[in-house]
């Protein structure tokens, strides 16, 4: 019997969040509708939700009390938190299938979900900063160094430590490859193309279907790569704020700000229409979105309504 295909990172995380919501108690009508919309939005969402219920039935005979005692001893958590943790561990950890990742003898996958940017230090001396919703698979050998970007955006500061110093470093995307030549640069996956911004050194872009149509960037330039060509260079001198763990707003609408902040925290963050047009300016840390929400409630005539940790609405005060 063939093994079911694994769920992607986003589906896994969202399914876990909805499971946690249902374990808080019965959903209200608005939450029920939101859950239904999520399930119908993508066949993978529905498959994950049905998978959860199947696993819960299989695990229904476990001694929940023993599990609670074990968890509370280590974490000092409440009964409800412990049972939720037990469920998440049982459904997504022990069962394993929902968090399954295909493994390669040479590659290691890194995934950053709905959280603040994460920085990795590789054995070759390179430094990678993964934005929220980013997945990259790293392949390091003495002959080549490949970073396979599967989703999101990635800031790369290339290194040359032994024994990898002579191996070329390339970022691989569905549209082609970006070869680093002693470089600090940004690679971002778009719907049908890859955007590349160069800040130091040099990079060479090579389209997937036209490998001879290469384009070399200079510092301060940006280009878009598709499967047949790399577009003309455009200026892009500033490094993105997210790579420094910051969210910068300059006369930004509150609903737009909320959408940006929602990328860096689990669950649902909504903005009511009655406050959506309020304007905000400032620099905010992505590492503590709760503190950002608290600051907003003091700077603007809004309140932060929390139905749960994972369901927050910004509304008029």
Image (cartoon, grey):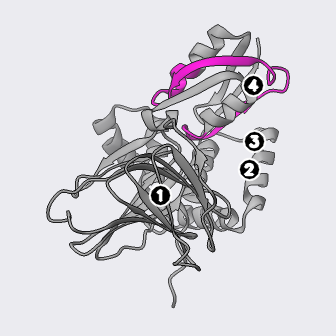
Where is residue 107? Give x, y as percent. Answer: 33, 70
Q: Is residue 187 left or right of residue 249?
A: left
Within 10 Å of disc 2 (Cα), the crowding (few <14, some 14-19, many 20+) is some
Image marks 4 and 3: residues in contact by CB distance under 8 Å: no
Q: Residue at x 62, y 73 (%)?
A: 227
Q: CA distance from mark 4 to mark 3?
A: 25 Å
Query: Can you tell which of label 1 and label 3 is closer to the viewer?
Result: 1
Q: CA distance from mark 1 to mark 2?
A: 25 Å
Q: CA distance from mark 3 to mark 2?
A: 6 Å
Where is residue 52? Give x, y as percent. Answer: 58, 62
Give the numbered dot on residue 135.
1
Q: Is residue 219 left or right of residue 268?
A: left
Q: Which residue range is magenta in the image? A: 263-292
Within 10 Å of disc 1 (Cα), the crowding (few <14, some 14-19, many 20+) is many
Query: Can you tell which of label 4 and label 3 is closer to the viewer?
Result: 4
Vertical side of 9 occupied by 155: above or below? above
Query: Depth check: 39 or 213 in front?
Result: 213
What residue does disc 4 label?
253
Tell which circle, 4 or 2, labels the residue nearer the N-terminal end: 2
What residue does disc 3 label?
31
Q: Residue furthest bottom?
A: 1
Where is residue 104? Give x, y as percent. Answer: 34, 75
Q: CA distance from mark 1 to mark 3?
A: 29 Å
Query: Depth check: 60 or 226 in front?
Result: 226
Tell which circle, 1 or 3, labels the residue nearer the N-terminal end: 3
Of helix, strand and loop, which one carries label 1?
strand
Query: Depth check: 77 or 154 in front?
Result: 154
Q: Residue at x 78, y 54 (%)?
A: 36
What residue does disc 2 label?
35
Tell which circle, 1 or 2, labels the residue nearer the N-terminal end: 2
């Amino acid at each position: 019997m063939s093994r079911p295909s694994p769920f992607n990172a986003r589906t896994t995380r969202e399914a876990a969040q909805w499971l946690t919501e249902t374990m808080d108690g019965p959903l209200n009508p608005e939450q029920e509708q939101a859950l239904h919309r999520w399930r119908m939005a993508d066949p993978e969402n529905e498959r994950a939700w049905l998978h959860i219920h199947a696993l819960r039935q299989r695990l229904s005979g476990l001694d929940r009390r023993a599990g609670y005692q074990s968890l509370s001893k280590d974490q000092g958590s409440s009964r409800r938190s412990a049972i939720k943790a037990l469920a998440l561990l049982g459904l997504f950890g022990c069962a394993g299938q929902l968090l399954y990742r295909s493994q390669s003898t040479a590659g290691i996958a890194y995934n950053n979900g709905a959280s603040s940017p994460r920085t990795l230090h590789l054995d070759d001396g390179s430094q990678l900063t993964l934005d929220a919703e980013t997945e990259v698979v790293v392949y390091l050998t003495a002959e080549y160094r490949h970073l396979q970007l599967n989703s999101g955006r990635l800031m790369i500061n290339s290194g040359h430590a032994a024994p990898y110093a002579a191996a070329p470093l390339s970022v691989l995307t569905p549209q082609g490859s970006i070869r680093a030549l002693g470089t600090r640069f940004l690679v971002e996956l778009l719907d049908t193309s890859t955007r590349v911004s160069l800040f130091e050194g040099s990079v060479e872009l090579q389209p997937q279907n036209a490998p001879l149509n290469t384009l070399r960037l200079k510092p301060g330039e940006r280009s878009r790569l598709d499967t047949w060509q790399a577009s003309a260079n455009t200026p892009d001198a500033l490094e993105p704020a997210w790579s420094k763990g910051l969210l910068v707003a300059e006369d930004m609408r509150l609903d737009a700000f909320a959408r940006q902040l929602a990328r860096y925290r689990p669950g649902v963050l909504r903005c009511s229409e009655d406050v959506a047009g309020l304007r905000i300016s400032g620099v905010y840390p992505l590492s503590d979105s709760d503190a950002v929400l608290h600051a907003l409630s003091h700077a603007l005539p809004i309140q932060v309504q929390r139905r749960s940790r994972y369901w927050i609405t910004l509304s008029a005060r």
